[in-house]
Amino acid sequence: MENYWTTVILVFLLAAIPASFQYYSDVVAAYNRIAIDCGATKITWDNITTYAWETDDRYIQSGENKLVSISTTRDEMKTLRSFPSGLKNCYNLPLKTLSKYLLRAGFLYGNYDNLQKPPAFGLEVQGNSMNVTVATSLSNDTIYHEFIFTTRKKGNVDVCLVQTQVNQVPFISSLEAKAIDLENSYRFMTENVALYLQSRINYGANSSVPERFAYYVDPYFRVWKPELVPRYRNIDNGFGPITWEWTEIENDPPNVVLDSAIVATNASDSESIFLPINFREKYRVTACFILYFDVSPVQQFVEETSKLDIFIDGQLLNTTQIPRVNRRVVVSMCPVNITGGTANLTISSADNATSPPFLNAIEVYSVIGVSKAAPSSTSLSVLGTFFGLLMCSLHVFL
């Protein structure tokens, strides 16, 4: 009888907890992730990705909540926090020490102030060891700044919005942080290096494929931009039901991303894959290129083993074989020196192979040394290559 009443009381207490709070706690615990809807007054949800976005009042006490005046399909972009007072306003984020994090900040001006004057301002992280100038626009598209880095012995990290010009009011729309696998992800990184994202593309995918996926599809909550390249075959298996898994190779790319690809029409030199990669920085930077290959969607075009040469700006940097068995291959090329703001990636069939070159997806980063403080720039660029938006990041235990 005692157990009966204990059970009844427990059920009653659980029922008294707001459903949204209970579900939110479950989501956060399961994803080991923090997501902040800056300027929001309540938790918001993304039914497609199963994301839960919390308010930012526990991380910062200054600033003002604002609503954008344009239409947007993303709930977390409908609000923002602006900072009309003070030269520097900081979020304080508790992170797990000596851990690898993916950090992303989103900015959507949305004419929230009815001035039609999108501002530029500074973003400083970890006591100015990383800093960047953010330039916003009148576009309805969100501007994201993302990097991957290893935390230090001190867990707390300050992320500061800095007014750098008169009448240019800083703001921020969203902050995300996700602890990622220290050993199996982006292995070429060291503790004193951060990666600033230049490009992450899901080649061959059409507009029906979303940029983001649920945790069981992409455990790191990355944004994969679908892109069709008209001069090549675009192979897309379609965006249908998704399995509850990701690919067990380096960096854990989502299966749905590897289900599409671009393929050259034949294996001749004239039919190599040529892709210009644009960088925010127009000066010399050190870059890392991560290429993902999966034979599965292109089996009808390739032989038993594909052998590919990979060039950057005309220099052969890698030759890789991609067999039908163990068909998934990740090629990382780092460091690579890039000048002028654009790198030319070429993928060709090697050793007179008759199979055409192909590519499923790519990630491109610039490399930032974080041991020194970097000066601010005056345009949308990262000093030295560090686009240091230190978004928010509260570590939640899995």
Image: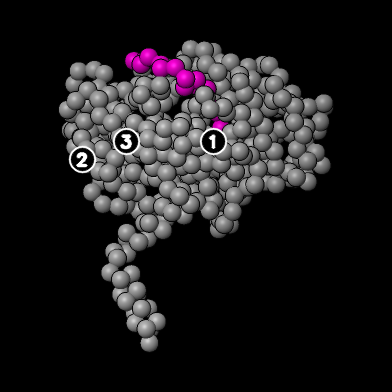
Q: Position of residue 267 (x, y in %)?
A: 76, 30
Q: Amino acid at mark 2?
A: Asn
Q: Position of residue 158 (x, y in %)?
A: 34, 31
For the rendered model, the colour scheme is one colour
| Residue 6 picture quarter | bottom left
Q: Amino acid at mark 3?
A: Asn
**Alpha carbon distance from label 1 to label 2:** 33 Å
Q: Residue at x 32, y 48 (%)?
A: 54
Residue for badge 1: 201
Q: Of discs 1 and 2, which sits in the foreground? A: 2
Q: Which mark is residue 84?
A: none
Q: Position of residue 190 (x, y in %)?
A: 56, 27
Q: Residues within 10 Å of mark 3 (few under 14, many from 20)?
A: some
Q: Amino acid at mark 1?
A: Ile
Q: Residue at x 36, y 21 (%)?
A: 128
Residue for badge 3: 92
| Residue 161 picture quarter | top left
Q: Of discs 2 and 3, which sits in the foreground? A: 3
Residue for badge 2: 65
**Alpha carbon distance from label 1 to label 3:** 31 Å
Task: Describe the element under mark 3 as helix, strand or loop.
Answer: strand
Q: Nearer the viewer, residue 164 or 262?
A: 164
Q: Earlier in the sequence, mark 2 or mark 3?
A: 2
Q: Which residues are magenta?
A: 363-378
